[in-house]
Amino acid sequence: MGRSNFDQLLKRYLTNQVSESEKIKIEAWLEIMKTEDTKNLELSKEDEEKLFERIINEKDNLKEIEALRPFKDASKAISRAGWFLRIAASIAAVVLIIYSIQNFLGGDEVLRFSSNNNTEKIILNDGTIVWLHKDSKLVYINKSKESIRYAELEGEALFEVAKDPAHPFLIKCNGAIVKVLGTSFSLKSSAKEILLRVLTGRVNLSTEANVRGAAIEPYEKAIVNSNGAIDKRLMRPEEVKDIIYGTEYMMSFNNVSLHEVLKRLEKKFDLRFQLDNVLAGRCRVTADLTDVSLDESLETLQEILNIKFQEKNNYIGVTGTGCD
């Protein structure tokens, strides 16, 4: 039997092939389900179809979606875990971009990511953002016992590493090791060489041939050749455009409306804002939020304007008069 429209939608969601509107609606519904007592719940085929139609509808109908609850049937006796497993089972055969496993590394969580023809954005649990370029692979392991964040890269990616001095971020790439505390840089490996290009902060790059490593500063690049030697050079200005192409890395605003700033933040951090005062959205903002965390970005906007942010179940509320 073929998969239902709802199953296919979930498949597209987990492989990042839904629209931003569909993504928001799916996550809003799942968030509501987390708060439900889902014992003995069953989502009928009719409700699945209703949910599918409401999610793909272009109207702003979040309340209708959140109101659609599964049917409670005592004869089914499906536990909460079992009910969510039922949803997962419909996509079990799909090759996912993102999945987690437990392996021999002392119970550490291992996340594996891959990209095909497009740049894929990954937001890790520490707030680090990775833009994984096409035909690339990333393995991420949060080694909590060792107080480090560890990743392995094949291909090319732009990293915006969340600042955390207590937990260094290490990336192994074709024999080289990149170590940072919180910075942004591009890393690319090929059969002939490894190319590191730094945008902000300081990056330590080491190899088996150079265990001590070299410190690479902003707008510098380092090339590691086949014998492990590190060649450090200045980065050309045009290389920056190449590094950030196809990403939401650059977040510099000059006299831009708050409404536009929030739209850009929504796209970068995969979230949704709701303005209580529409007029506040017209206030102008001049600020550079590039390589700045979400929390720091919101704090900056609160300092600039008379607004406050409050996290809700499935969005961030924005209150205040703005610029008066």
Image (cartoon, rainbow, N blue to C red):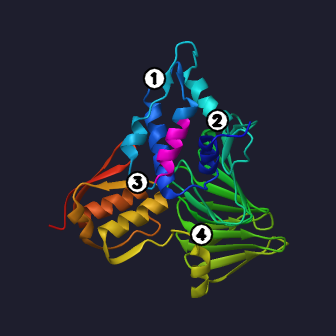
Q: CA distance from mark 2 to mark 3?
A: 27 Å
Give residue 88's mark: 2
Question: Which segment is the magenta one?
Answer: 48-57
Which residue does the numbered mark 1 point to in the structure image?
Answer: 37
Q: Position of residue 34 (x, y in %)?
A: 47, 32
Give residue 277's mark: none
User: Which class describes the residues within 10 Å of circle 3: few (<14), some (14-19), or many (20+)?
Assistant: few
User: Which class describes the residues within 10 Å of circle 1: few (<14), some (14-19), or many (20+)?
Assistant: few
Q: Secondary structure at mark 3?
A: loop
CB atoms at circles 1 and 4 under 8 Å apart?
Answer: no
Q: Secondary structure at mark 2?
A: helix
Q: CA distance from mark 1 to mark 4?
A: 45 Å
Residue sitting farthest toward the left = 324
Q: Position of residue 202 (x, y in %)?
A: 56, 69
Q: CA distance from mark 2 to mark 4?
A: 35 Å
Amino acid type, mark 4 = Phe
Residue at figure coordinates x 76%, y 36% from the top left: 104
Q: Is residue 84 left or right of residue 277?
A: right
